[in-house]
Image: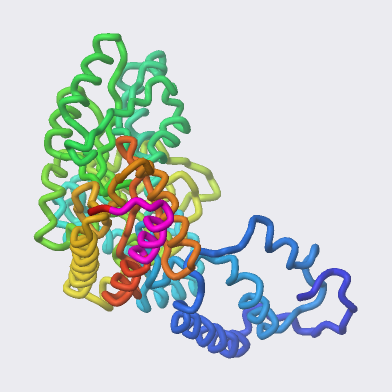
């Protein structure tokens, strides 16, 4: 690894950072490196065992003055960087909803980088804009979304690829806020209220803060074990009615299809009843669970979505599309454009005022945007709906298999009913040892082995282990091996504590 203090060498007189033949040679090297990484990924500890600050101590203090060969860089990548990586693509990664990958998405990402367009408007990237419009309509068709969410319907609805769900919630909150202010006046800004459950993703509260919802007006409706930690429409209605009686203005409600902790599914139809009654914007966050709805047997989870104002879903979580790719659909795109549009002279172009084109800079926070629709297009064309459905069903089968294994051991229990490919379980309470402490120690032991990686959550005061199936490379043998490892850890813990379950 070089630094500014390295001996000066004579530089090449022809600096060509995008020479096609040089790229061809280096790209072959890189593809070999990546393919070999995938082949041997199981040899790495799933969760990095590095300590904070490890990397700075192993890298030079300054960048190299002279160029270094790719071979040297790859050696350092293997020796210094990879030890600090938690391997999300490992087949033994079960900690979080996956960031799925595939050959088709990889090729799509290469093409996206190849063209390097900045598609802020139709004029800046006609193909980029129109391909995005096509693929979000394709995915809407796969999900059997109402036509009011599609460009092809021509009624003002449509979709856009955001980076993450966080941005989808943020931009829809901005649109909802501006719609309300246009109606009741800016003097009521401090009275606007937004609603979610205590299981709604924390990005909801963050977005509320960004759009200046008063911190005291961000409602978190309590959930319970009895309802599987789903949002209660009855409690939502009570909270909204109380706020109205207090002179506040209900603005926005976020219903989640597959919460981060336990994959709880908030009921869309009765939530839409409350939203409609009080004139609120209803957003459905289907970041994880929504992908399952391309399978007819899971489509019922989206019943009532035709009454929502917006819906977001992240293909990078379950549709093999790589980070980052979050599709957002809105029924009235004009509200989004009105809230987010900018008209700067240097961004203008001949069709700028035309209503027949889309300028995606007006559908998002930033101006610049990548050609990310290529990734989704490659995935949909390369695999087809049938293979993507089988991918979802395969993960569901493996999760069900793990769930059965858990239920077959009387020392364990499934804490929350499984909706998708996440199993929430724990060692059952026994004797004087606190169950939360016991399960925390079990999780720490499993992760410390490097042979599997899980995570935890706490719901209803209960410390729960999360086993999320979904990494592209995961097969049944990996699920069985992880269960064997968990049982091994439980055996050791229970022997040490001396507390056995009859």
Q: Nearer the viewer, residue 385 or 454?
A: 454
Residue 470 location, x and y as percent?
31, 65
Quadrant containing the N terminus is bottom right
Which residue is pictured at 54% across the width and 64% down the height? 48
Which residue is pictured at 32% across the width and 28% down the height? 220
Which residue is pictured at 20% across the width and 57% down the height? 140
Horizontal relation, residue 41 to residue 53: left or right: left
Residue 490 location, x and y as percent?
36, 59
Classified by dominant secondary structure, the portion drawn in magenta counts as helix
Q: Nearer the viewer, residue 109 or 165?
A: 165
Corner quadrant of residue 381? bottom left
Q: Name the colouring of the figure.
A: rainbow
Q: Nearer the viewer, residue 15 or 27?
A: 27
Q: Is residue 466 above or below residue 272?
A: below
Which residue is pictured at 28% across the width and 28% down the height? 221
Corner quadrant of residue 222? top left
Total marks drawn? 0
Q: Is residue 194 above or below residue 133?
A: above
Residue 400 location, x and y as percent?
19, 63
Quadrant containing the C terminus is bottom left
Q: Is residue 225 above or below residue 302?
A: above
Horizontal relation, residue 39 to residue 491: left or right: right
Question: From this viewpoint, is residue 53 visible?
Answer: yes
Horizontal relation, residue 446 to residue 423: left or right: right
Corner quadrant of residue 67? bottom right
User: Does the stretch in magenta take in 495?
Assistant: yes
User: Does the stretch in magenta take in 409?
Assistant: no
Q: Nearer the viewer, residue 8 or 440?
A: 440
The segment highlighted magenta reads 486-500
């Amino acid at each position: 690894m070089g630094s500014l203090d390295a001996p000066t060498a004579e530089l090449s007189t022809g600096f060509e950072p995008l020479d096609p033949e040089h790229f061809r040679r280096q790209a072959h090297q890189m593809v070999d490196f990546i393919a070999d990484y995938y082949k041997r990924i199981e040899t790495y500890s799933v969760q990095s065992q590095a300590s904070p600050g490890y990397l700075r101590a192993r890298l030079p203090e300054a960048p190299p003055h002279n160029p270094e060969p790719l071979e040297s860089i790859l050696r350092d990548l293997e020796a210094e960087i990879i030890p600090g990586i938690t391997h999300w693509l490992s087949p033994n990664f079960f900690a979080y909803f996956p960031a799925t990958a595939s050959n088709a998405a990889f090729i799509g990402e290469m093409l996206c980088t190849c063209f390097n367009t900045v598609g802020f408007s139709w004029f800046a990237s006609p193909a980029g804009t129109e391909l995005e419009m096509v693929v979000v309509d394709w995915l809407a068709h796969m999900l059997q979304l109402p036509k009011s969410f599609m460009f092809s319907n021509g009624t003002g609805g449509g979709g856009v690829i955001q980076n993450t769900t966080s941005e989808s919630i943020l931009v829809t909150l901005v649109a909802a806020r501006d719609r309300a202010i246009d109606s009741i006046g800016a003097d009521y800004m401090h009275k606007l209220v937004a609603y979610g459950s205590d299981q709604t993703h924390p990005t909801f509260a963050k977005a509320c803060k960004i759009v200046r919802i008063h911190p005291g007006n961000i409602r978190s409706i309590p959930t319970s074990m009895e309802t599987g930690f789903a949002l209660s429409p009855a409690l939502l209605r009570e909270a909204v009615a109380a706020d109205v009686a207090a002179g506040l203005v209900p603005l926005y409600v976020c219903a989640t299809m597959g919460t981060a902790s336990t994959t709880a599914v908030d009921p869309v139809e009765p939530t839409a009843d409350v939203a409609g009654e009080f004139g609120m914007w209803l957003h459905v966050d289907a970041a994880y669970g929504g992908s399952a709805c391309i399978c007819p047997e899971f489509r019922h989870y989206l019943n009532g979505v035709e009454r929502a104002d917006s819906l977001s879903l992240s293909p990078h979580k379950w549709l093999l599309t790589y980070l980052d790719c979050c599709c957002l659909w809105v029924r009235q795109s004009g509200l989004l454009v009105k809230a987010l549009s900018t008209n700067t002279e240097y961004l203008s172009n001949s069709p700028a005022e035309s209503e027949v084109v889309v300028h995606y800079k007006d559908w998002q926070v930033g101006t610049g945007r990548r050609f990310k629709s290529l990734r989704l297009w490659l995935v949909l064309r390369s695999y087809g709906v049938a293979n993507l459905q089988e991918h979802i069903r395969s993960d569901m089968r493996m999760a069900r298999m793990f769930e059965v294994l858990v239920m077959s051991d009387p020392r364990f229990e499934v804490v929350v009913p499984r909706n998708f490919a996440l199993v929430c379980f724990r060692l059952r309470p026994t004797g004087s040892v606190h169950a939360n402490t016991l399960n925390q120690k079990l999780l720490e032991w499993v992760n410390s082995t490097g042979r599997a990686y899980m995570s935890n959550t706490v719901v209803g005061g209960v410390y729960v282990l999360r086993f999320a199936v979904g990494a592209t490379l995961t097969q049944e043998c990996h699920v069985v091996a992880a269960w064997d490892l968990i049982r091994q850890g439980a055996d050791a813990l229970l022997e040490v504590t001396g507390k056995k379950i009859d």
